[in-house]
Amino acid sequence: MNLKMLCAGATLLLVLFATACGSSEDSPPGAKKLSFELTDEGCLPHQASAPAGPITFEAENTGSSKVTEIEVMEGDTILGEKENLSDGLSGSFSLTLDAGEYAIYCPGGDVEKGTLTVTGESKAKASPKADAAVAHYRRFLEGNAEELVAKTEPFVAAVVAGEVAEAKSLYASARAPYERIEPVAESFGDLDPRIDARENDVPASEFEGFHRIEKALWLEEGQMEVDVDMAPTAKQLQKDVEELAGKVETVELRAVQIANGAVELLGEVSASKITGEEERYSHTDLFDFQANVEGAEAAFDAVRPLLDETDPTLADEIDADINAVFVELEPYRRGDGFVPYTELTKADTRKLARSIDTLAEKMSQVPAAIAEGEHA
């Protein structure tokens, strides 16, 4: 990809952003390539068309600080995306699409949504292996959604009661199930920012969910119950996770979408979460990293039968890379948890970033490799 030489630089910042600088993802055989520029105006062109079948979306940020991602959506469902494309960076992802109209969504642009028209004959149905992959992954979603509801309840109760120490002790474990389902979190629409938005990701008036409570618990220390009433925020969080759990049985999913979600999640970990910006107050980032990799592993396990048909060697390499990340996390484990992220040195974070980036690079090849086998 572009900026390959830049990505090879020695500074920590460039190491952390290696995934965003490019990937080795190839297009599926016979894929139509669509190219977009990320600009302040939005993604150009605003209107695009392609024949039904495999499509590779290529995007390059040509100077925008407002627009750093591109998504392909069907209704409220995100089918594929590429995030963290700051000025000068490029990336791609592949999907297999039936005939119909889709949205090209580029949040932050003057024109945020464009239209993709896919023409020709629609595929009759997904292949049996693709259906099995979706069913496998949905079971994983359902289990983690149930766990999310169950673990959020005592956390919320502690916040409402003003029991700061108890709430702090429950925070990381309550969040873990959500971090595992992040490959498809955006498929749940505005529930994702309501549950998991970080400060500055949304307007101040919309900052709520786990991270708003995190800020109150750690930044404002033991004065939470005196100076900041988090009870309404906590109660709304419980309602939101329960609403999410009610949607996992019916949310529309596709095999390539699941694979793309895992790629994007690992890219986000390598490009931005590794800096410590996710848990900026609690410094429980390593809990998130483990859950994120577990979530990516579950997504990969679901689609692996499709990959075994086209590239079993890659599948084995990804297995090894997943295990390597877990090995890298072991030195920082303490009992059932991890040391605060602030205890890691720059050398520690560089090493961890490299292992996650290696995994992300291999995983980025999966969507294109399985795209052809997604339909019968």
Image: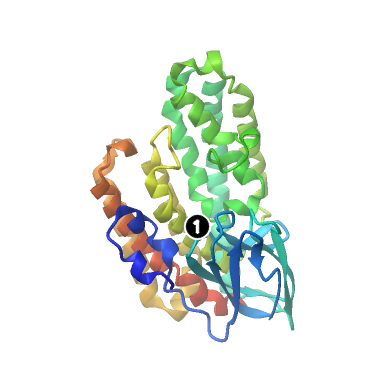
Question: Residue 294: x, y in percent?
Answer: 42, 52
State the residue at coordinates (65%, 57%).
109
Q: Amino acid at mark 1?
A: Asn
How many marks overall?
1
Q: Is residue 120 above or below residue 97?
A: below
**Residue 274: image x %, image y %?**
38, 49
Q: Nearer the viewer, residue 213 or 346?
A: 346
Residue pictured at 55% horizontal, 76% vertical: 371
Which residue of the protein is positioned furthest toward the bottom in this rendering? 30
Left-right relation of 32 to 75: left
Percent position (x, y) of residue 309?
47, 79
Q: Is residue 153 above or below residue 290?
A: above
> In which image quadrant can residue 77 be found?
bottom right
- Residue 333: name its quadrant: top left
Q: Secondary structure at mark 1?
A: loop
**Left or right: 6 as drawn, with respect to 299:** left
The location of residue 94, given as percent across then percent down, is 56, 73
User: In the rendered view, does 21 fall on the left or right side of 129?
Assistant: left
Q: Nearer the viewer, residue 339 or 357?
A: 357
| Residue extending farthest front | 63
**Left or right: 137 with respect to 252?**
left
**In the picture, residue 338 is in which quadrant?**
top left
Classify the position of the C terminus by image quarter.
bottom right
Q: Residue furthest top?
A: 226
Residue 161 appears in the figure: no
Residue at 50% x, 68% y: name it: 91
Q: Is residue 371 visible?
A: yes
Q: How would you rate the neighbour count of disc 1 (Cα within 10 Å): few for under 14, some for 14-19, many for 20 or more?
A: many
Residue bearing the label numbered 1: 84
18, 168: nearer the viewer? 18
Report the quarter where the N terminus lies: bottom left
* Colour logic: rainbow
